[in-house]
Image (cartoon, grey):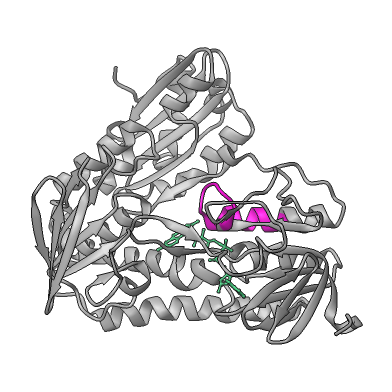
Amino acid sequence: MSATAENTFDIVILGGGSGGYACALRAAELGLSVALVEKGKLGGTCLHMGCIPTKALLHAAEVADTAREGQQFGVKTTFESVDMNGVNAYKDGVVGRLYKGLQGLVKSKSIEYVEGAGHLVAKNTIEVAGRKLVGKNIVLATGSYAKTLPGLDITGRIMTSEQALFLDYVPARVVVLGGGVIGVEFASVFKSFGSEVTIIEALPRLVAAEDEAISKQLERSFRKRKINFKTGVKFSGVTQTGDVVNVSLESGDTIEADLLLVAVGRGPVTAGLGYEEAGVTMDRGFVLANERLQTNIDGIYAVGDIVPGLQLAHRGFAQGIFVAEQIAGLNPPVIDEMGIPRVTYCDPEIASIGYTEAQAKAKFAEIETYDYSLGGNGKSQILQTQGFIKLVRQKDGPVVGVHMIGARMGEQVGEAQLIYNWEALPSDVAQLIHAHPTQNEALGEAHLALAGKPLHAHG
Ligand SMILES: Cc1cc2nc3c(=O)[nH]c(=O)nc-3n(C[C@H](O)[C@H](O)[C@H](O)COP(=O)(O)OP(=O)(O)OC[C@H]3O[C@@H](n4cnc5c(N)ncnc54)[C@H](O)[C@@H]3O)c2cc1C
């Protein structure tokens, strides 16, 4: 079939998740003709199975805890129970409204939205149900899936986040396999909903990608919340009998539970899509791209979770926008992966940007660090939360890492990322005025202290 005008575009994008749809929207804004191919739901993992539904569950969890803890604020509340049908209706309502809005947005931008499973059949062609879409440029954005371990089948009461998002009951006992971001977020939700939770993590600490001090504080907080965890321990097997799972560990321990949540990471969705056949260089299923997100094949780009690096929606958005601008000839500045903010939404929340202390020590000649305890922050005391803000700077140089833990600290990552990305000195931030009493003030205070003029800081 020869390429007809209606099947020829400036860009053909495979996958309508965060990376793919952001690329489509920006390309359309720039006057490029775009086809966006999606086999499932526009919005992808983030909107339907990831960021949005999990954060709705976490908010419901916070409401449950608030009901339980009214007494400490002198308010007589009682926690009765969690109605999962109600929780799911609330969560699905949020997702549904955003989905509708996104569909409208894509429609309004004259993007050719093509439903169906696409396949790269030539270096400039995606085929969907026999229709060949020819692009001057191709953007691969097929995202990721929940991985499991060899021999560990996802079935019945052994599930990944995909099934756990749709539970219609609160399990009494849950084992969470994996103490990374997704694992600790679900552990936090289940605990607040009333489950007894045990996290199994093979690495020596929870959220091992974060600064070590953050992991320690999270572990202290989880202990206080009576969330059980075993670190440095490997899973060896599981049996499922009726409604009960028995999880065994290499240490010889076994744990009986009603549900095993497997949260061992996400793999790229790239198998069987024609990428290798087109000659695209891959590594263990990931698509390799340079800093301008070009693959080794001229005119083929890749964005989002299929590109090695942080698997985050806002990285996908940024990469999608970048590629559209790159194709439009705007020569956008390359994305600094260290400058991408990271938030883990468990209770307490974790937010960070830039280098951990260990990474900074390896990268820079000399560094300084400072920990500001939320104990000195009025608003955090009002909220009754504990935690700290840790700053890492190059000696006599800019701040290269900000690491925060405590209730609602995710909201502080906006300023933290400006500080990192604008290479601010502690003295630059110290002279900016932070409103009192806010948790944001703690960021200001940490920089005051690191600039040598602490205010509400002990030690
Ligand atoms: C439980 C969970 C919680 C998360 N929470 C957060 C969070 O709080 N913050 C955050 O930033 N990130 C979070 N993430 C990660 C975030 O969802 C991903 O980083 C993001 O969705 C990646 O975007 P993407 O475009 O690369 O891929 P995806 O969103 O996975 O989109 C890829 C799309 O491609 C489509 N596709 C695949 N193959 C084909 C094909 N052959 N033809 C047509 N279409 C195809 C898929 O249907 C999908 O819609 C979370 C993820 C999970 C699982």
All told, the count of numbered labels is 0
Of all residues, the one furthest to the front in this rendering is: 277
Indicate whether residue 393 is drawn in magenta.
no
| Any part of residue 312 in sight | yes
Splitting the image into 4 quarters, where does residue 300 fall?
A: bottom right
Instruction: Please identify the quadrant where the C terminus is shown.
Output: top left
Residue at 21 percent across and 52 percent down: it is 235
Magenta stretch, residue numbers: 306-321
Residue at 55 percent across and 63 percent down: it is 143
**Residue 169: % across, % down:** 21, 78
**Residue 384: % across, % down:** 24, 46
| Any part of residue 70 in sight | no
- Closest to the observer: 199 or 156? 156
Taken as a whole, is the magenta stretch helix, strand or loop? helix
Figure check: 388 above or below 37: above
**Residue 189: % across, % down:** 26, 62
**Residue 423: % across, % down:** 62, 28
Residue at 55 percent across and 40 percent down: it is 417
Residue at 29 percent across and 40 percent down: it is 203
Is residue 48 rendered to the left or right of residue 143? Answer: left
- Closest to the observer: 217 or 62? 217
Is residue 302 rendered to the left or right of residue 111? Answer: left
Indicate whether residue 309 is drawn in magenta.
yes
